[in-house]
Image (cartoon, rainbow, N blue to C red):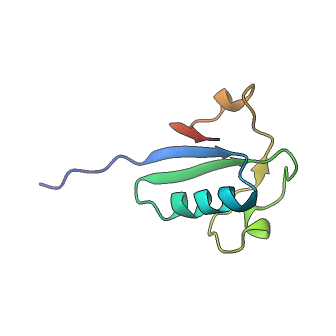
């Protein structure tokens, strides 16, 4: 029998820049990860695709930080 693989919902805080873009691409191409939210205090409201057109996500940058991250329904955070 096939065992179903759990899909983990993840968020990224500090998603801008070289490392952030590489991490987002890895998450997007991972079969067991679902990108739920991205944080960048300087890009709040901007579409992720505008900064990183190679990504398929329709998410927008949010102002996510250590004080408010608990309100998001994610299994894990990447910082």
Q: Which quarter shows the N terminus?
A: bottom left
When the figure is inspected, residue 33 is found, relative to residue 18, above or below; the finding is above
Residue at 17% across / 55% down in the picture?
A: 2
- Out of 1 and 12, give the one closest to the viewer: 12
As drawn, the residue found furthest toward the right would be 42
Q: Could you say where residue 20 lies in the image, as x and y percent from the top left?
A: 67, 56
Q: Is residue 69 left or right of residue 46?
A: left
Residue 49's place in the image compared with 31, above or below, is below
Q: Is residue 49 above or below residue 12?
A: below
44 vs 2, left or right, is right
Name which residue lies at 78% across and 66% down. 51
Give residue 68's quadrant in the image: top right
- Residue 64: x and y, percent? 75, 38
| Residue situated furthest left in the rendering | 1
**Which residue is drawn at the image coordinates 53% and 38% (left, top)?**
76
- Residue 41, position as x, y percentages in the image: 84, 44
Residue at far bottom of view:
54
Count of all numbered marks drawn on residues in the image: 0
Residue occupying image coordinates x 71% and y 73%: 53
Specify whether 51 is left or right of 13.
Answer: right
If the image is split into quadrants, where does the C terminus sit?
Answer: top right
Q: Locate residue 34 relative to residue 38 in the image: left or right.
A: left
In the displayed structure, 43 sits above or below 47; it is above
């Amino acid at each position: 029998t096939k065992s179903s693989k759990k899909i983990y919902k993840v968020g990224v805080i500090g998603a801008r820049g070289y490392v952030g873009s590489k991490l987002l691409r890895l998450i997007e191409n991972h079969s067991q990860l679902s990108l739920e939210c991205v944080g960048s205090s300087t890009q709040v409201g901007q579409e992720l695709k505008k900064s990183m057109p190679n990504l398929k996500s329709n998410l927008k940058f949010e102002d996510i930080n250590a004080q408010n991250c608990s309100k998001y329904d994610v299994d894990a955070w990447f910082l």
